[in-house]
Image: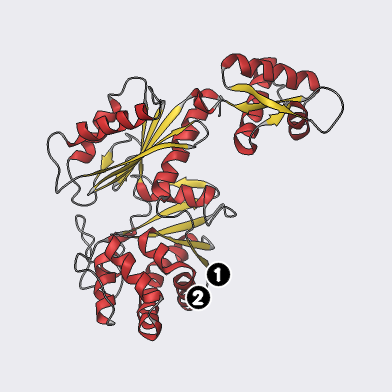
Amino acid sequence: MTTARTATPSTARAINDRLALNLLLEQGPLTATELRDLTGLSRPTVADLLERLQRTGLVAVIGERGEQRRGPNARVYGLVASRAHIAAFDVRSGGVSLVVADLAGHTLATAEVPVEGDGGPDTAAAITATLLETARGAGVERLHTVAVGAPGLVDPATGRLQSTGKLPGWHAELLAALEELPGTEVILENEVNLAGRAEHRVGAARDRDTFVLLWLGHSVGAAVILDGRLRRGFSGGTGEICFLPVPGTVGLPSADSCEGGFHGLVGSAAVCTLAREHGLPADPAGDAPAAEAAVRAAVDAGDAGGRFLDELAERIAVGAASVCVVLDPGCVVLGGEVGRAGGAGLAGRVERRLARLSPLSTEVRAGTAGGGAVLAGAVLTAGDAVRRDLFGEP
């Protein structure tokens, strides 16, 4: 017979502190009475934890409330968001976007650093210097955690980045430079996985614990969330569906090229080519912004645009069906530049075609985390790491 263990006083205090801190983070400033109502804790317990959290510098009195009633006003307690600061990176071949934020995830400053070609020997140092300058400009001298979203496989065992394509050398050099920052934890994650976290926490899949984000941009990838957990796979390759062999391509993919895979059907260059075949304008650059512009133009182009979107939806549904019949996620979110540009109209077309390819009921939604989904996911990831440290999160 198993006997249940009773929490020690120190464990109980840690649990109560964490509960209160998360409520202040999620709901904003609260009075002691509101904390008692939300937590179910006694008046002395709430008074004790508030005093304890003020001593740690995590909570402070930020005002008073109760001017409409008799008696003294109630103190209002708030999370001290300046207690720790984080940074987030979206790393692409052509440069980086970065955000500096506080403990609550509020953006304090942003910066863009374009990189020409393959960069140079000082690229990583220049980007790191920009991060520090941006942070100092926002009054931040130390970064607790930096989360980096980058293309490629992130090995779950080593945390190192492995390229699945021809990525510039400065990507790895940037990670090394960031890891040299004193007292700063660096978290590396695949950029589509971060976008999936953003859709789960603040985007189109907030009501879903199981779904797949299909990222449609320069290339194509997927983030797999099952039972509320991000799945990476043995080598970090879960979601590398750009390599998925599908009908309609000129050949088959190989270990070092996804051109013959699903990428060849719905990557940005393929989307631009398809648009031109339907008489729609598409920049010859064939990059993600060009594909996004082509899809946006098609949405407003009448019959010609409709025929293009129909064929694009057919292509997307082929890859989505392959994912759905294996994972049965019940929901697919279309993200990336193409998914964002197509919106609900493209999502509806894909859903109808997917229903003809698979016997499994699958809802298709347009992503709502926006163009900054990778950065949003990186901010969430860095914030989670800080709270594990400061709040004692399990």
Q: Which mark is residue 355?
A: 2
Q: Residues within 10 Å of mark 2 (few under 14, many from 20)?
A: some
- Residue 191 visible here: yes
Q: SS of the residue at dot 2?
A: helix
Which one is earlier in the sequence, the residue at label 2 or at label 1?
Answer: 2
Residue 50 in the image: x percent, y percent? 68, 20
Q: Which image quarter: residue 24?
A: top right
Q: Which image quarter: residue 57?
A: top right
Residue 379 lies left or right of residue 282; in this view the side is right
**Residue located farthest toward the left when viewing the structure as drawn:** 121
**Are the two marked residues, 2 and 1, in contact with CB atoms closer than 8 angstroms?**
yes
Residue 157 in the image: x percent, y percent? 35, 35
Residue situated in front as seen by the camera: 366 or 294: 294
At x 47% / y 61%, what residue is drawn?
A: 333
State the residue position of label 1. Answer: 361
Residue 51 in the image: x percent, y percent? 68, 16
